[in-house]
Amino acid sequence: MGVRYFNADSNQNYTRPTGFVFPNGLSSLPVLNSIDYLIVAGGGGGGRERGGGGGAGGFRTSNSFTANGTYTVVVGAGGPGSTSISAKGVNGSNSGIYNVSTSIWSTGGGGGGSAASPFHVGAAGGSGGGGAGNAGGGAGGPGTPGQGNNGG
């Protein structure tokens, strides 16, 4: 069974699916004008063999967000790991909430560096991907300020 939504008409009269019974102590859906949110993006994929680890997805949070209208929510997927020692892991996908007047996004995690030069440096992301640990090594990718950390 899919998710059911409450709908309000212009007089703020709420409708509910046929047969729905409110839980004890709850008689109607409140009108929200402020919400808390935590948005986490998908993590990055790691590099193959001696490659670096993928970075964590960036995150954004607020406990004083003023909501205005209906929002679309996007949940970002994690990036796949590398299938070749000469390719980085794939960055994770961004996550966010948005409508016509507001847009809030978290950046996907950076892919891990590969074991083969010149691709051994981790990719930029919410948290940057790790650099490869092979001879000569690679630097970690940069993280997005306010969302994550630099890769190692």
Image (tube, rainbow, N blue to C red):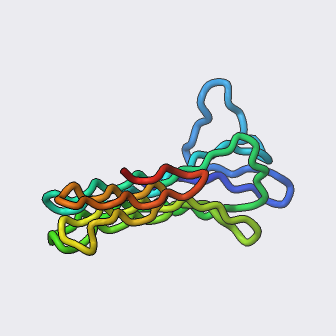
In the image, residue 92 above or below residue 86: above
Residue extending farthest front: 136
Q: Residue at left 13%, top 59%?
A: 49
Closer to us: 37 or 115: 115
Q: Is residue 24 visible?
A: yes
Q: Is residue 80 left or right of residue 10?
A: left
Tell me residue 147's x, y (percent): 56, 52
Closer to us: 41 or 130: 130
Closer to us: 54 or 65: 54
Tell me residue 29's x, y (percent): 71, 42
Tell me residue 39's x, y (percent): 55, 51
Q: Splitting the image into 4 quarters, where does residue 28 fall?
A: top right
Q: Splitting the image into 4 quarters, where does residue 53 fall?
A: bottom left
Q: Residue at left 69%, top 51%?
A: 15
In the image, residue 64 above or below residue 99: above
Q: Is residue 43 left or right of residue 107?
A: left
Q: Is residue 5 left or right of residue 134?
A: right
Residue extending farthest top: 25
Tell me residue 75's x, y (percent): 47, 59
Q: Is residue 50 left or right of residue 102?
A: left
Q: Residue at left 47%, top 60%?
A: 142
Q: Residue at left 60%, top 64%?
A: 72
